Image (cartoon, rainbow, N blue to C red):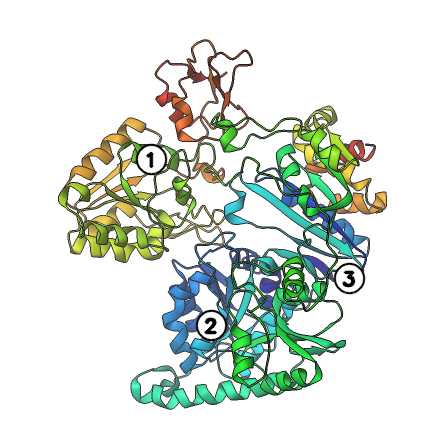
Amino acid sequence: MKEILSGNEAIARGAFEAGCRVASAYPGTPSTEILETITRYRDINSSWAPNEKVALEVAIGASFGGARALVCMKHVGVNVAADPLFTASYTGVKAGLVLVAADDPEMHSSQNEQDSRNYARFAKVPMLEPGDSQECSEFTRLAFDLSEQFDTPVMLRSCTRISHGKSIVELGERRNDLPPPRLVKDAAKLVMLPGNAKVRHPLVEERTVKVSAFGDTAAFNRMELRSSEIGVICAGVTYQYVREALPEASVLKLGMVWPLPENLIRQFAAAVDQLFVVEELDPFIEEQVKALGIATRGKELIPRCGELSPGRIRDSFATAGVIVVPKVVTVAPEALPPRPPNMCPGCPHRGLFYQLNRANAYVTGDIGCYTLGFMPPLNAMDTCVCMGASISIGSGIVRALPAEEQKRVVAVIGDSTFLHTGVNSLMEMAWNRAPATVVILDNRITAMTGRQENPASGFTLNGEPASEVNIPELCRVLGIKNVRLVDPYDLEATRQALDEEMNRPEPSVIVTNRPCCLIKGGGRFEKGMVLEVDQGRCTGCKACLRIGCPAIEWKPDPEGNTGKAFIDPSLCTGCTVCQQLCRFSAIGGKR
Amino acid sequence: MSYAVTNILLVGVGGQGILLASEILSEAFMLAGFEVKKSEIHGMSQRGGSVVSHVRFGSQVLSPVVPEGEGDLLFGFELLETYRALPLLKPGAKVVVNDYRIPPPSVLLGQVPYPDDLLARIRSRFPEVLPVDGQGLAQAAGDLRAANTVLLGAVSRRLSIADEVWRQALERMLPRKALEINLQAFAKGRTL
């Protein structure tokens, strides 16, 4: 049977067919839908973890117990999971262990565009890179097999265009011939003390040599000989772009991007007149080909930053004088009003960021929907580095500042991000008495990635009721004495809380307590009465526009008089934040 | 290109239902026996931002992304976003556009006006443009929420896929209770 699947759905399908028993992940674009799909396969024990390190360790544990295990994360998640990854490379596995890293070239939804392939080389584990959804399914199954064959974790690298691209996949049956999980004592392999690790390291080095040789003849590395004039080494989605941009070129399509098949590369290089490596981001393959003593060109013509596309590859080859392309006539882009992402109408973060702006706070931010608090007209975020960093960066900034400026420092972090890596930061801040203010935006969900449950939301990935971290209590036991709750829809209460806590010369935490307005189920979010502007009372002062709500539109007067504000009833959720800003009582409930 | 691939771009604002429309299109192409690939960006760009979905079908499809300047058919859910996407099209491309405006933030804040005459400006570059009153026709069909299906019907007329295949794709992709109203909305669009 055939189905149109996204790369993420196909990875989930591949894991199911491979007999995977345990799957763990922390949500992160573009990887999130892998676990959301896996939860449909009830033969797999699947769950969210608070962060990627924990997720990988859950998967390592399942593998040690003899079950095939999958762990998924976005590229920056691998940074968090790097610690167990590097040593799991030494222990190897008891059953197949596959780590999916989804890169985001072009940074569609990320803070950097690091190239995960470097991790495969660094941690000395094989990495496969699929080029469409069919290969996502096939390579996932293959990754489990290779993991067991070579006693190693295997990484599967996706990217935004593969994970979120859809194409046709042939569906297969689930394997049921795998040995049942059971405990087997094997301390020499699994207890990584120096004595044992010294024995394991040479095995890791030998393994890389063996996998490289295996890749020389494996079907996943494929030579396609066409014209001998141009030969291109490529992998993943870039293969599709190269085939489209240079249809006559010979291609060496690598299914495994680490370790590289040295003999196959030499064979291909000998078969073509000019050799190129076309790859997104780093010159990862190029440097290794050059290290083999083979002349090739790559980043001297192909951009290092951003995504590639057939057009960009064609342009690069044309600019370098390798090919001649006819000029394509298209409509020239014009300067138009941009449409950046925005917080939703009714978003509970809006009132808080409005007050942070008014309070002249210096806001150390974090990763989530609330990072949009940076955008005008709220303009209330000053730093954003990585998950959990808001609190520790705030804690660090205050110790560099004079007392008067210390007051201005406010860290903002969402519930899911706080539980991901913010808890340790708050522990540090309390312990070392850094006098910053932390606001935990508890909207009861991991909103940015599409509303996934988290350890404080009260439900598991599968929708089952679960324990619920009490965030204010957690802050108290970490050593924060001043913990208070505030309703972010109440502008005056929010202002007062910020004012008092910012002026307090010791650590304090404010927890906002409104659920995300997109959680419609379970009675978590309640829509209020739709608001409207009384056009007679509106003076056109624009105070309500300062919160940047997408439901409020400024309508200029056709005759040149002062314009008026207008609320779109189809968008308004009745949060009343704009109503509290109107000094002329022009905003009221609509029947 | 050595393979005859048809390139469709769906553009609009996050939350308008573009992804579902592109999935119905893809399903129809698969049912009609073509290879199909589609691509779009989730996450950050969906928070009310511009959305572009790429759908390509043919005997063999390589890149999931439509190369710039090679779009054959633009399916616009909103005027400004449709105008913004014109550089993705090849000369002579067809455009089906919902005659509907969603003001972007700078317009909401009264900093700049919503660009005027967009329809005329699209027509001057792509004479084969069909403006559709998606919302109005959907209301006439009995449900404002079926606006996208009216537009999809209008798009379907510009693609050589049989009536029966479209029906099957809609049946497979839509919830049962919404099917009847959407089939009516689709039929209305297909006459345009």
Which percent across, then down, holds residue B80? 62, 34
- Residue B184, image quadrant: top right
Classify mark 2: helix, strand or loop: helix
Name the kind of residue labelled 2 in the image: Asn
In the displayed structure, would residue A91 be above or below residue B11?
A: below
Q: For mark 1, what is the residue?
A: A352
- Report whether B12 appears left or right of B34: left
- For the N terminus of chain A, which image quadrant? bottom right
Q: Nearer the viewer, residue A363 or A194?
A: A363
Q: Say few, some or many: other residues with alpha carbon within 10 Å of mark 2 (under 14 / 14 to 19 / 20 or more).
A: some
Q: Given the current orientation, which residue lies at the most extreme top position?
A: A536
Which circle, 1 or 3, is nearer the viewer? 3
Q: Given the current orientation, which residue lies at the most extreme front position?
A: A321
Q: In the image, what residue occupies the spot 51% across and 56% down?
A: A32
Find the distance from the CA under tag 1 to the CA under tag 3. Answer: 51 Å
Which percent across, then down, holds residue A211? 55, 85
Q: Can residue A10 be seen?
A: yes
Q: For mark 2, what is the residue?
A: A118
Report in which chain the residue with disc 3 lies: B
Q: Say few, some or many: other residues with alpha carbon within 10 Å of mark 3 (under 14 / 14 to 19 / 20 or more).
A: some
Does mark 3 fall on the same chain as mark 1?
no
Who comes first in sequence, dot 2 or dot 1? 2
Classify mark 1: helix, strand or loop: helix
Name the kind of residue labelled 1 in the image: Leu
Q: What is the number of the mark on residue A387?
A: none
Which percent across, then down, holds residue A485? 27, 38
Q: Say few, some or many: other residues with alpha carbon within 10 Å of mark 1 (under 14 / 14 to 19 / 20 or more).
A: many
Q: For mark 3, what is the residue?
A: B60
Find the distance from the CA under tag 2 to the CA under tag 3. Answer: 32 Å
